[in-house]
Structures are given as C-alpha cells and as structure tokens.
Image (cartoon, rainbow, N blue to C red):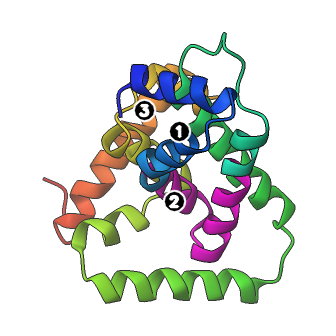
Amino acid sequence: MADNNLSILMNEVRHGNKDAFGKLYQDIKVPVYTIIWRIVRNTSVAEEIMQELFLKIYVSPPDENVKNIRAWIFSIAHNLAIDYLRKHKSDSNDEVLESNMETADIIAERRVDINSAVNRLTVPESEIITLHTLCGFSFKEISVITKKSIPSVYRLYRKAIKNLHKSLNGGYEK
C-alpha cells in the first residue's frame, strides 16, 4: 500500500472509522506479521504481538504530524517483538527448543528453499532482509525502525545476502 493511502486510512482511523481500520489491517497484516515472526520465530507469539500492535493502533493512533505511517507501524511492531524477547530471555531452553522445532516443522512442511535459507539468518539479518525486500523500506527507513545506523543496516543487509547465497548454493560461496 502506498504511503499516501496509508496516511489517508490512518486519518480516518483517528476519527473512529472502523471500516478504515479493517482496511488498514488487511493491507499491512502480512508484512507486519512477517517481520514480527522473523524476530520472535514463534507463530503464536507473533500472533499475540500482532493483536497487541493493532490494539495500540486502534486505541491510540499516531499524531497527525507523523509523516511516515508505515515506518511508525513497523517501529512499534519491531519494539514489541524485541520487548517480548527481552522479557522472555530467561525462559527455559525447552521453550527455545520447542520454538525451533516449530520453525523446523514450518520449513519442512512448505519445503521452500528460500524460506529455509532466510530462517538460518540471524534475527537482525532476517529482519533487515524482510523489511527491505518484502516491505520495500529503504535503508534509511530501516535504520529508523531498528534504531541502527544506516551503515550498520547496509552491512547487515550485505552480510545477509552473502549468507543467503551461500545457503542456497549448498554451503558454497560463488
């Protein structure tokens, strides 16, 4: 969805238009869910964070002076996912193993090489690849969302691309 259309929808949401909120949800739910899942790597947790995100948007939409609504939404999604990881950092290894098994089941079920390769990336690499390729964010916008410098975002992106090439070529670099 174009940023201008998103701004129009968000303006309608600010004025209590429930249909606009539903349209907003439908238009951005997939890329938002994807970025959350790439961080937490757990389906049920990603769904809970999605609910929390859209509740925040509905209850307290951004001020009218927020210029880039998409970046604002993805920043909130990123922060909620990172907060979740911080809060559950001390959870038992069983949960981590269960989450990894869930991830492995999804990969095996779909048998998609690219998904498997992306899942082997580190969380920051995976997040940046998703934000740039799936969501269409620039490196500058990703820098704002992830709170990393632009050179750092670009370096992580290049490293992720290199790792994807290596993974998709059976462990060999071209």
Is residue 52 something that shows in the picture?
yes
For numbered disc 1, what is the local secondary structure?
helix
For numbered disc 2, what is the local secondary structure?
helix
Q: Which residue is mark 3?
A: 155
Q: Which residue is mark 2?
A: 38
Which mark is on residue 20?
1
Q: Earlier in the sequence, mark 3 or mark 2?
A: 2
Which residue ends up furthest to the top in the rendered image? 65
| Disc 1/disc 2 C-alpha distance (Å) | 27 Å
Q: Earlier in the sequence, mark 1 or mark 3?
A: 1
Q: Earlier in the sequence, mark 1 or mark 2?
A: 1
Using the image, determine if residue 146 lies above or below residue 29: above
Residue found 72% across the figure and 18% down from its top: 63
- Name which residue type carries label 3: Arg
| Disc 3/disc 2 C-alpha distance (Å) | 19 Å
Give the image location of residue 163, x and y in percent. Answer: 32, 55
Residue found 24% across the figure and 75% down from its top: 112
- The answer to which quarter of the image holds residue 30 is bottom left
Using the image, determine if residue 156 lies above or below residue 123: above
Q: Write down the region rendered in magenta.
A: 31-53
